[in-house]
Image (cartoon, rainbow, N blue to C red):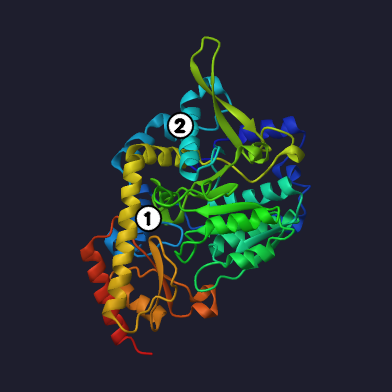
Amino acid sequence: MDYVQNTPSDVAAMLRTVGVRTLDDLFAAVPAPLRRDRPLDLPPALPEADLVAHLEALAARNRVFEPGRCFLGAGAYGRFIPAVVDALSGRGEFVTSYTPYQAEASQGTLQHIFEFQTMICELAGMDVANASHYDGATALQEAVAMAAEHTGRDRAVLSAALHPQYRAVTRSLCRARGIRILEVASVRGTTPVSTLKTAAEGAACVVVQNPNFFGCLEDLPGAARAAHEAGALAVAVVNPLSLALLKSPGECGCDIAVGEAQPLGLELSFGGPGCGFLAAREALLRRMPGRIVGQTVDAEGRRGFVLTLQTREQHIRREKATSNICSNQTHMALRAAIAMAALGPGGLRRAAELGVRRAHELAERLERGSASVKLPFPAPFFDEFVAVVPHASRVARRLLEQGFLAGLDLHPFGLALRDHLLLCCTERHTPADLEAFAAALEEAVRTVSP
């Protein structure tokens, strides 16, 4: 059985209906050089038992790290996920649901999207949030496009301390929209507000990440003022869990907040799927991409939910759409909403506090224990920090052999970052984990050859 549902007679009937004799006739409009005239070079099918054994052998090649031995963050984090997240999000009505085009038949889906939007607004200090995005990087590009449409300007200022992948996605997608990107260099781990102020002249928006890619805390109120004085919008890229402790983008004067909801109940899952969020002030409501779920009452006065604004190309004419790349990650948004509801404000704050405490304990332990390990950036940091480690790439490989995932080697992101490691801690690290990692790192530094 080849799992192709159309029988030869089905295919023949469809070809007659279309008005052609063969499948080759159907695809005649495709130039011959672009058509494959031979079967795909695939191995023969396996019996089910052999296939299972083959897949198990492939899976066994993966390296699995215990939570306390993984110090890699850089945008994706191994945080604690309450058991209720899997229990509820795994229910059949959630895992099989699709786009809620019919509101009267999709009240449950619409409600949990509405709850997600509400909680994102509360965290970000904003008036309105949409029904999520593919990921944080595409959410940022949408925010930049919003700012360009709102201001009528075609240039965006990005801090170079913004995540490199977010910058790359934004550059790529903005190029097609005619939006120019200007990057402002960071100095000792943070972005000088004075430089942002100069660069913001004539720009549609100023984008700053807080905590930034290096884990450092930026002057978000200062960046917002610099943007507004130049007539630009202020866009903040944020880690949602950090907002349980830090002032929200709204409190700091920003106009738009974007980020990745992965720290809120989403597994790492080999890098995805994620769940981007975008929240903004009410004045920007009709510039927002995608769609928004709203709360209303029916004819009998009962609470109900509807798709309030639907500005994506599936709903309106493409030329009128605010975006044609956005989509809501409904299931991931559901997991994030369940996690936020289960933990509550106190639980989110406690998780954030533990991550911050563990990161600072590790930083102090590394500086105290080894004269060769230094912290190059003086700025306060959240739960990630950069450490200068001699022969960092070789040290990281040595630690990998000992079962430690020793953060991110920053050398590929710039020559000035040679021998710099970005280390992350979460609430899943214990003091014993920190001591074991610090001791292993110091030993690796002593024994690795230059």
- Side of 49 relative to 26 (left or right): left
Residue at 30 percent across and 75 percent down: it is 366
Residue at 32 percent across and 65 percent down: it is 360
Q: Label 2 is placed on what type of residue? A: His
Using the image, determine if residue 290 lies above or below residue 142.
Answer: above
- Side of 269 relative to 258 (left or right): left
- Quarter holding the C terminus is bottom left
Residue at 55 percent across and 47 percent down: it is 134
| 145, 195: nearer the viewer | 195
Name of the residue lying farthest toward the top? 300
Residue 309 lies in what quarter of the image?
top right
As helix, strand or loop, the secondary structure at mark 2 comes to helix
Using the image, determine if residue 421 lies above or below residue 17.
Answer: below
Residue 429 lies in what quarter of the image?
bottom left
| 286, 413: nearer the viewer | 286
- Identify the residue position indicated by label 1 in the image: 55
As helix, strand or loop, the secondary structure at mark 1 comes to helix
- Side of 287 relative to 364 (left or right): right
- Identify the residue position indicated by label 2 in the image: 112
Residue 326 lies in what quarter of the image?
top right
Q: Residues within 10 Å of mark 1 (few under 14, many from 20)?
A: few
- Side of 194 relative to 337 (left or right): right
- Along the polypeptide, which appears first: circle 2 or circle 1? 1
Label number found at residue 66 = none
Residue at 49 percent across and 64 percent down: it is 213
Can residue 31 be seen by looking at this rendering? yes
- x and y percent of residue 299 in the render? 55, 10
Q: Label 1 is placed on what type of residue? A: Leu
Q: CA distance from mark 2 to mark 1?
A: 35 Å
Using the image, determine if residue 368 lies above or below residue 318.
Answer: below
- x and y percent of residue 165 in the render? 55, 62
- x and y percent of residue 297 in the render? 53, 17
